[in-house]
C-alpha cells in the first residue's frame, strides 16, 4: 500500500500520476491496465479538483491510497476528499449514440472510467467523499 496526501488542484496531477506509475512499475503492471488506470486516475482527480471544493480553485485536501492485492491481482485507488457530497456513480450514463453537440456537456469521463475499471465504489463517511476504482491486472 502507498499513500499520498495532496491538495486537490490540477497542478498536482503529474505528481500523483508519477507516484502511481512508480508503484505500478514495482508491481510489473502490464501496460494496458496501467494506461487504463492512468486515465481513470486523471478523470477522478480532475473532477475532485474542479468540483469538490467549489469552482474557485481553492483546493482542499485529497488523500489517495494505492493498493495491490497479490492474491486477487486487484490494483485499487481510493480517493478521499472533504468536499461537497457528490456521487459520480448516481448520474445517468451519457447517450453515446448521440453526437457530441446533441449529448451536451458532462458525464463522459466518468462513463469512460466505468467502462475501463472492473469495479467502482462511492460512499460518504464522516463528512468525506470516498471513491474507489479497482482494476484486475492481467
Image: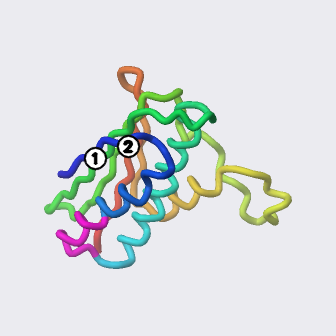
70, 80: nearer the viewer: 80
27, 124: nearer the viewer: 27
Q: Tell me, yes or no, whether the highlighted magenta stretch contains residue 24.
A: yes
Q: Answer whether labels 2 and 1 touch (C-beta < 8 Å).
A: no
Whole-percent x, y for residue 97 in the image: 76, 66
Q: Residue at x 48, y 44 (%)?
A: 9
User: Would you name the residue on which mark 1 appears?
Assistant: 4
47, 70: nearer the viewer: 47
- The number of numbered discs placed on residues in the rendered structure image is 2
Whole-percent x, y for residue 2 in the image: 20, 51
Where does the magenta region start and end? Answer: 21-29
Q: Quadrant of residue 36?
A: bottom left
Above or below for 54 versus 7 = above
Using the numbered discs, state the Cα–Cα distance from disc 2 to disc 1 in whole angstroms.
Answer: 10 Å
Secondary structure state at the residue bearing disc 1: strand
Q: Residue at x 51, y 50 (%)?
A: 10
User: Would you name the residue on which mark 2 appears?
Assistant: 79
Between disc 2 and disc 1, whose residue precedes?
Answer: 1
Q: Residue at x 43, y 39 (%)?
A: 122
Whole-percent x, y for residue 114 in the image: 51, 56
The nearer-to-camera label among 2 and 1 is: 1
Secondary structure state at the residue bearing disc 2: strand
Please indicate whether residue 49 sits to the left or right of residue 138 in the image. Answer: right
Amino acid at each position: 500500500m502507498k499513500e499520498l496526501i495532496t491538495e486537490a488542484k490540477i497542478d498536482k496531477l503529474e505528481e500523483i500520476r508519477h507516484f502511481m506509475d512508480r508503484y505500478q512499475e514495482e508491481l510489473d503492471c502490464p501496460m494496458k491496465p496501467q494506461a487504463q488506470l492512468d486515465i481513470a486516475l486523471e478523470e477522478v482527480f480532475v473532477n475532485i479538483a474542479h468540483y469538490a471544493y467549489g469552482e474557485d480553485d481553492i483546493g482542499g485536501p485529497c488523500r489517495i491510497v494505492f493498493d495491490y492485492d497479490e492474491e486477487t491481482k486487484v490494483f485499487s485507488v481510493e480517493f478521499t476528499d472533504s468536499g461537497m457530497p457528490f456521487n459520480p456513480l448516481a448520474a445517468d450514463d451519457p447517450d453515446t449514440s448521440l453526437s457530441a453537440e446533441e449529448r451536451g456537456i458532462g458525464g463522459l469521463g466518468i462513463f469512460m472510467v466505468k467502462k475501463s475499471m472492473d469495479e467502482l465504489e462511492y460512499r460518504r463517511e464522516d463528512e468525506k467523499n470516498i471513491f474507489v476504482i479497482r482494476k484486475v491486472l492481467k
